Image (tube, grey):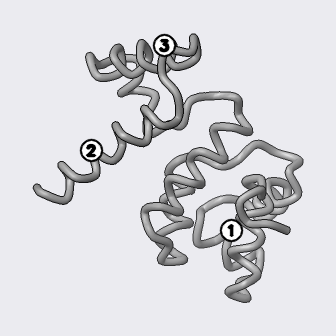
Amino acid sequence: MDREKMRFGEYIRYQRLRREITLREMSEALGISLSMLSDIEQMRKKPFSTQAIDRFCGYLGLPDEERIRMLDMAAAERGKLPSDLSNIMMNTDIGDMARFALRMSNAGYADAEDWKKFIWQIERKRKQA
């Protein structure tokens, strides 16, 4: 299966099996029951918490990009905003601006090229810091 199209449970299982970690070992490392982990891998239950995602990434030594990817996958399956973004998006001036920009983009006033330019400017600024 294409890693880019994996759902949360499939991704957890993929990462666990490629390292030859048993369900029991992983469930103990995450502090969740073996049956809960199995149900998540089989997509019978919703993804686990942000704290368990952090433990998962720490246990496997996954980079921050993978943590972000997991937060996005978990949020998509829950039908919610990723947990690392929800406070920013709903409780800050930056969130107000981001929601406005997204709505303007949705209305056709900005396209992918506009977003690429904006992201490129941010990346350039970050690298200069």
Looking at numbered disc 1 in the image, what kind of residue is underneath it?
A: Ser
Q: Residue at x 56, y 47 (%)?
A: 71
Q: Residue at x 79, y 66 (%)?
A: 2
Give left or right: position of 9 versus 59.
right
Looking at numbered disc 3 in the image, what kind of residue is underneath it?
A: Met
Residue 6, quarter of the rendered image: bottom right
Residue for badge 3:
104
Image quarter where the C terminus lies is: bottom left
Cα–Cα gap, marks 2 and 1: 38 Å
Image quarter where the N terminus lies is: bottom right
Cα–Cα gap, marks 3 and 2: 19 Å
Secondary structure at numbered mark 1: helix
Secondary structure at numbered mark 3: helix
Residue for badge 2:
122
Asked if labels 1 and 3 touch by Cβ distance under 8 angstroms, the answer is no
Cα–Cα gap, marks 3 and 1: 43 Å
Q: Residues within 10 Å of mark 2 (few under 14, many from 20)?
A: few
Chain-order first, disc 2 or disc 1: 1
Of the two numbered discs 3 and 1 in the rendering, the one whose residue sits closer to the viewer: 3
